[in-house]
């Protein structure tokens, strides 16, 4: 991310409104989910597993929990 410029000595209201509009547009885009269409069925909520001894079902439960958490946060839909 680029550094913000220094504040000008005087402010042009029209230029200030243009900047605010650009910021609002960027914030609206950032607020949208990055991806859509994720569906989890038959998952059991789990946030821990032993990386040395876990099985596929346990890993799937952790993944399902992560997807649900990201959906609740609004990162994905």
Image: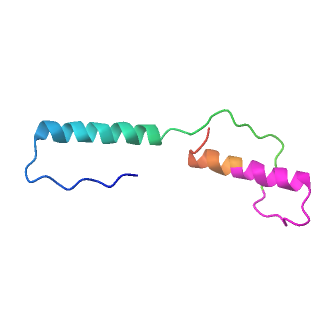
Is residue 44 in view from this perspective? no
Could you tell me which quadrant the C terminus lies in? Answer: top right
Q: Position of residue 17 (x, y in %)?
A: 20, 38
Residue 34 appears left or right of 4: right
- Seen from this angle, which residue lies furthest left? 10
Q: Which stretch appears magenta?
A: 46-66
Colour scheme used in the picture? rainbow
Q: Is residue 63 magenta?
A: yes
- Seen from this angle, which residue lies furthest top? 37
- Seen from this angle, which residue lies furthest front? 2
Q: Position of residue 12 (x, y in %)?
A: 10, 41
**How many marks can you see?**
0
Residue 20 picture quarter: top left
Residue 76 lies, with reference to residue 7, above or below; the image says above
Using the image as rendered, state which of residue 40 and residue 25 is in the foreground. 25
Q: Position of residue 41 (x, y in %)?
A: 80, 40
Q: Position of residue 63 (x, y in %)?
A: 76, 51
Q: Residue at x 78, y 55 (%)?
A: 62
Q: Residue at x 75, y 61 (%)?
A: 47
Residue 3 lies, with reference to residue 19, above or below; the image says below
Q: Is residue 11 magenta?
A: no
Q: Residue at x 33, y 40 (%)?
A: 24
Is residue 76 in view from this perspective? yes
Using the image as rendered, state which of residue 17 and residue 6 is in the foreground. 6
Residue 19 picture quarter: top left
Residue 6 appears left or right of 25: left
Using the image as rendered, state which of residue 28 and residue 42 is in the foreground. 28
Q: Residue at x 7, y 50 (%)?
A: 10
Residue 72 appears left or right of 23: right
């Amino acid at each position: 991310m680029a550094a913000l410029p220094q504040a000008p000595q005087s402010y042009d209201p029209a230029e200030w409104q243009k900047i605010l509009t650009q910021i609002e547009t960027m914030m609206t885009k950032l607020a949208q989910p990055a991806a859509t269409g994720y569906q989890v069925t038959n998952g059991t909520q789990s946030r821990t597993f032993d990386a040395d001894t876990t099985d596929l079902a346990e890993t799937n439960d952790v993944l399902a929990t992560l997807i649900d958490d990201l959906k609740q946060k609004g990162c994905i839909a």
